[in-house]
Every structure is written in C-alpha cells, then in structure tokens.
Amino acid sequence: MTTDPRDGTSGPSLGVSTKLVTSALLLLLIGACAAPPDVDDLIAEAAVSKPDPTVVGARGPLSAEQSKAVIVKLEQQSKDATVLERHLALEAALDDAPLVTGNKVTLLRDGGATIPAMFAAMRAAKFSIHLEYFIFEDIDDHGERLSDLLAQAARRGVQVDVIYDSIGSDDTSSAFFDRLKAAGVRFVDFHPATPLAIAAPTSLNDRDHRKILVVDSRVAIMGGVNMSKAYMNPPPQKLYAGAGARRETAALYWRDTDIEIEGPAVAQLQRLFFDTWQKQGGEALPDAGSLPQLSPAGSEVVQVLGSSPTQAVPEYYVALLTAIRNAESRIWLTTGYFVPTHAERRDLIQAARRGVDVRLLLPGESDSDLALEAGHASYSDLLEAGVKIYERHGSILHSKTTVIDGVWSEVGSSNFDHRSVLFNNEVDAVILGRQTAGQLEAMFQDDLKSAGEVTLEAWRNRPLWGRLHEFFSRLWQTLL
C-alpha cells in the first residue's frame, strides 16, 4: 500500500512521499489561499428558472415528450418530488452531465465483491480495457494477479490503457510497470512528481483521485475502491468492538463501495477517461474518436459527474449541496474523510434544524490522523443541531455514498472534504429512483451495526488534548 498517509493525499502529513518534502511549504501556501467556490447564486438561479434537463437514452438525446415521460416516472417514485425537481433544474448548469436512461446498476460492497467483478470484466474483454486509478498496484483475485491478467489481455490483442496518479502510486514496483509495458500496455502518469514539478507546485497538489474501469466501452466499475493491496486485508472477526485501543491501520479491513454500470451511461465514464488521457499528453488512442451505441440494460437513470480543479464549478459539489438543501425527510451520508467545507457543514445543520433525519457514518479510525481530527472540529455544531453521528471502529471506512429522501443517491470517489472540491479529479454517479437508493439505505443500516453513536453529552466531555488536536488540525483543513 502506498506510503502516502491517506487516500486523499493530504500534503503536510507525517509519512508523506519524499518527492514532496521540498515542496511542502509551497503546497501549504497554495492550500491556505484556496477556498471552495461560492455556488449559492448558481443554485438559487436554477431553483427559480427550473430549466428543462438534458435526458439521453441509448440512441442519444431524447425528445421533449420522451424526456418529460422519464421525469414524470421519476417523480412518481417520490412522495415529494421537490428534491428531484430542484436537482433536475441544475442540469442547465451542468451541461456536460446529462441524465442517462436505460442503465443497470449493481452495488458492489468492499473489495471482496468489487475486485472479483473487476477481474471478471477484464478477463472477458474483447477490445479494450481502460483503467484510471489513484492507487494502481499489482493486486490479486484468488491467486490471479492483475499483472498476469492485463499482460495476457494485451498479448491477445486487447487495447489496455492505464492512467495512474503519480503520488498515489508512488510505492508501486517499477517491475510491475515494466512488465506491463513490455506486453504492450500504455500508461499515463498523472502529474508526475518530478523535480521539475516543484516549479509548478499546483500540479503536485492537484491529484487524480478517480477510480474507473471501463471494459469494451460497455461495462464500467467505479466508486471508492482502488487497485490497492489494502483491500486484501481480512475482515474483522466481529462486527463492533467499540472505540478501544488504537489498532495498526495498515492491517485493518477496508470498508468501501463501488457500482457496476451497464448501459448508455458507460459512455460518460469512457469520455472522462479519454479527456484525462488527452489532457495529460497520452499518445493517440485508436478508439478515442468513437463510442459504440449501447442498448438499454436496465431501468436506472444515472448522471455521471466528473469534477476537476480546472472547473469553475465542481459539478458534484453543486449537485450534492442542492440535494442536501432540498431534502425533505432524510440524509444518510457515508464518507471516508470528513473535513466539510463551510457550505457543507452549514447545509447539514440547516437540514437537521428543519426536521430532516441527518445521519453521518464516519471513520472512527483512519490512515490519516490529521483528517480525523479536522473532522472532529465540526462535531459540536453538528450534534447541537441534531445531526446524528456514528463512527465505525475496527476497520478503515473508505466508502463515499449518500442517500437523500430514498430517491436521490450517489456513489463515487469524492469525499466530504475540501480536497475533493478544490484539488482532485473526482468521479461520482448520481442515481435517481428508489431501486438503488433502497439498496444503499439497507447497506447504511447494516453498517450502523459496526458503528457507535457519538452523543452530544459524551462529546462535550471529551478530553482537553482532543480539543487541542482539533484546533490545530484546522490549520490544514483546505489541504485535507
């Protein structure tokens, strides 16, 4: 597993990559000057104007009548369509993120389900395998190594292309890359951490945090699971042992969530991969100019949101805040790193105060103590407003999911933190409708069995040293 202190690459933490030591001060200055964008006017304007969203099907954009039929069907699934109406209104601002109908969405829990699904999809590849990962290591599935699988695919004529993050994959063996290159696999090293990069420290801070696998442009897997050996750790022996003595995080089980998508929405993920490949200077790809026409594979409506620091408006950030602000009954949110922006914290508090059931499932143990402590700095205000906070212990919580009103749900790579808004390339899928939302709510309730609730009374009586850690951790929050 990478020596970087956390999946989100917090710059100034202990254990940071030696390639970044000389630029740590520069990164701190960049982070100190950065601030999440103010999207209040954009959200308010969309709420008033309520423009018609762009709806795409298997054969391209739908007609006005077809689009209306899709929207009416979605609204019929909700007792109160407000959250859907407001979210749909945002489509005018998110021109590159249409609603895509006709998809099959399969929920994948942890590496135990995700990695076999990845290997099965790649094993069946006929034309192309495209991978974009923050951490890219030689993992295995029941004894079959990723290096063997990809090398064999390349040698039988499958086009294999990989984008990996330079910092996230800093500890990956060069022999792994050399073997795959010899087999014909092509690579793009995202923002390489070279001495020359110190002259442009912004590129060191901006990372590719996405986790995307697209096979034959027809099936895609995305979410929080990296191609990382951390997911080979065994599961805990019992569900919840409480917040006891600190465990060695390197050996802990990683709790995560991915989804497998089949249907027209796969094209949106494929385009994101091609766009990053081209912007990072990758060699021309033979399949980048055209995508196959995908037949409907299911009934799910999916919106793929690809965010990056180059965007004036991070798409996922706007969509999430809009959904939170218009929640009517419940917001159940799980995140691996919780360092909320001012707007995120404010909107959760306001939702709880208007009677929404706001529940946060957060890590009790983490591979980044700094991120954990920075998150704790928000607990008091949230608990006082009525937000329910649960911490998972005995494993590393890395999942990033949200379910709102049982009809708006999200799975992706974005954490509930500053870094996902300011510095990272991220990818998230919003799924509209009750089917996936119901499955995610069931998963959330099951996860609560492995978590303990943080009560306001107990939090007010926490030790003084904890309060001091929270105070000083805020100095780094824009980098976390």
Image (cartoon, rainbow, N blue to C red):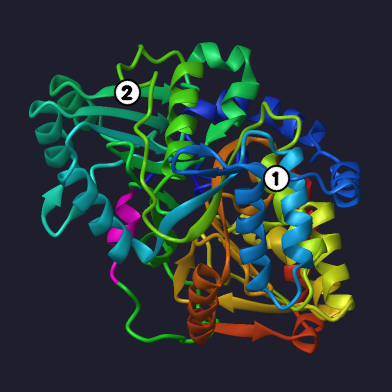
Residue in the image at 53% along x and 62% along y = 366
Whichever of callouts 2 and 1 sits on the residue coming sooner in the sequence is 1
Query: Residue 412 placed where, x, y %?
Result: 52, 52
| Residue receiving disc 1 | 53
Residue 337 lies in quadrant: bottom right
Q: Secondary structure at mark 1?
A: loop
Q: Does the segment drawn in magenta span residue 233?
A: yes
**Residue 376 bears which disc, if any?**
none
**Numbered disc 2: secondary structure:** strand
Q: Nearer the viewer, residue 477 or 436?
A: 436
Dot 1, crowdedness within 10 Å: few (<14), some or many (≥20)?
A: many
Residue at screen point 17% across, 29% down: 158
Q: Which residue is mark 2?
A: 187
Residue shown at 70% from the left, 45% from the top: 53
Give the x, y percent position of residue 475.
78, 47
- x and y percent of residue 94 in the render? 70, 38
Amino acid tagged 2: Phe
The foreground one among 287 and 65 is: 65
- Image height of 166 relative to 420, above or below: above
- Name the foreground residue: 399 vs 62: 62
Image location of residue 195, percent across then percent down: 50, 14
Q: Check if mark 2's residue and mark 1's residue have beta carbons within 8 Å.
A: no
Please, is residue 306 above or below residue 108 in the view?
above
Question: What are the residue bounds of the magenta stretch?
Answer: 228-234
Q: Does residue 469 appear anywhere in the picture?
A: no
